[in-house]
Image (cartoon, helix red, strand yellow):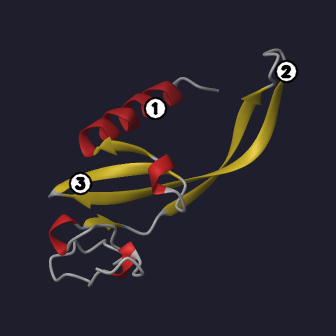
Amino acid sequence: MSSSESPRALPFPSSCPAWCAGEHEASSVADIAHRSEGITVPGVERSLHPNGDIHAIGVTEITIGLEQTRGETWVWFGSDQFARQSTVLSIETTKRVMRAVTALLGDAP
């Protein structure tokens, strides 16, 4: 790949998972990172004021998607635009987080 080509310009390999969006980030076809389209979840977040006493409520969006690198599939949470600023968890960890959140919310008003 020449230095003027985008890393996303790699060919769409026949081995892509069904959920792959076809935008690949890698230096070679062998190291392609498959990424799904992100699912954006709108939400409300609380932020603490710098002095720690007052919080602000704001609107946010969390994007969730799948990524596969070297045969391992991961779940990413964060911005669809900035993959390097995402939190990336294993499938097993994501399932544990989902069970924990479900249990916590079971007792919430």
Q: CA distance from mark 1 to mark 3?
A: 22 Å
Q: Residues within 10 Å of mark 3 (few under 14, many from 20)?
A: some
The label nearer to you, 1 versus 3, is: 3
Q: Residues within 10 Å of mark 1 (few under 14, many from 20)?
A: few
The residue that label 1 is drawn on is 101
Name the residue: 32% across, 33% down: 96
Q: Is residue 69 left or right of residue 102?
A: left
Dividing the image into 4 quarters, which one contains the C terminus?
A: top right
The residue carrying mark 3 is: 73
* Nearest the eye: 94 or 85: 85
- Residue 58's mark? none
Quadrant hosting residue 98: top left
Q: Nearer the viewer, mark 2 or mark 1?
A: 2
Q: CA distance from mark 2 to mark 3?
A: 40 Å
Residue at image location 25% in from the left, 59% down from the top: 68
**Residue 17 in the image: above or below residue 12:** above
Does the residue at mark 1 contact the one at mark 3 (Cβ under 8 Å)? no
Residue at 36% in and 82% down: 9
Q: Amino acid at mark 3?
A: Thr
Judged left or right of residue 54, residue 86 is left
Q: Secondary structure at mark 1?
A: helix
Labelled pair 2, 1 in contact (Cβ < 8 Å):
no
Does label 1 or label 3 sit earlier along the sequence? 3
Residue 32 image position (x, y, % from top left): 24, 68
In the displayed structure, does residue 1 sit left or right of residue 53?
A: left
Say if mark 2 contacts mark 3, CB within 8 Å: no
Q: Helix, strand or loop at disc 3?
A: strand
Residue type (three-letter) at the residue carrying disc 2: Ile
Residue 93 vs 31, above or below: the answer is above
Instruction: Give the labeled residue for mark 2.
Output: 54
Comes first in the chain, label 2 or label 3: 2
